Image: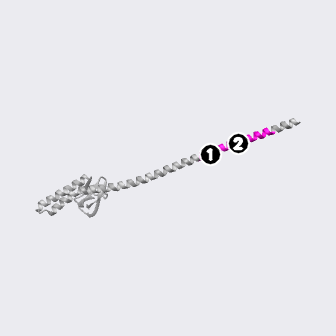
Amino acid sequence: MADKKKKNSEKASENEIKEETAKKAEENEASAEQNAEEGKCEELKKQLAEANDKLLRTLAEYDNFRKRSQKEKEALYSDVKAETINKLLPVADNLERAALAEADFESYKKGVQMTLNQFFEILSSLGVTPFGKKGENFDPNIHNGVMHEENEDLPENTVSDVFIRGYKMGDKIIRHATVKVAN
């Protein structure tokens, strides 16, 4: 019997050792899983921080781009304005000369006509075209009708007189033509 008790005691000890070993293995496995989860969590936090940093850098780049574009736009506007004025200065010079010159009416008129031609050539080189002539069909998109007349010699909705010519650059109307419309 003593052998049986000894065997039972050994079996109980073995079972206890097995149970402890199984518990330790489970604890080690749980600890390893927890460490793996913590490692994943740290990795995800690192990725989030990198993505956040990248987003902030992108936002800063965009803000700098927007500011730079605005400055370039303002500089371009100023440059185009100065270039346009520079092209018109010869006309002003010729008008000053005409105002100071002593001449008869015909030569004065000829000088003014030459200055006007120079001015219209400059406008043309800038892509500006005049419109608004007698006989054109009235178009409210480009004409400003300020008067109306009954005229049997002209068809309906025809420009009968032009008070101020209109100007356009491409499809953009710079100034509407001020006209009198017949019928």
Check residue 2 in the rendering and tell me which mark sits there, or answer none. none
Q: Residue at x 67, y 44 (%)?
A: 31
Q: Is residue 120 left or right of residue 16?
A: left
Q: Residue 98 appears at what percent x and percent y?
A: 15, 61
Q: Residue 115 appears at what percent x and percent y?
A: 18, 57
Q: How many marks?
A: 2
Q: Decide: few, some or many residues near mark 1? Use Cα within 10 Å; few <14, some 14-19, many ≥20.
A: few
Q: Is residue 51 left or right of residue 65?
A: right
Q: Is residue 53 left or right of residue 3?
A: left
Badge 1 marks a residue whose secondary structure is helix
Task: Tell me whether the residue at label 2 lies in contact with that at label 1, contact meaning CB atoms closer than 8 angstroms.
Answer: no
66 in magenta: no
Reading the image, the residue beneath label 1 is 37
Q: Quadrant of the N terminus?
A: top right
Reading the image, the residue beneath label 2 is 26
Q: Mark 2 to mark 1: distance in Å?
A: 16 Å
The single residue placed furthest to the top in the displayed view is 3
What is the span of residues highlighted in magenta in the rendered image?
12-41
Let me know if residue 17 appears in the view: yes
Q: Residue at x 84, y 38 (%)?
A: 8
Nearest the camera: 138 or 37? 37
Q: Amino acid at mark 2?
A: Glu
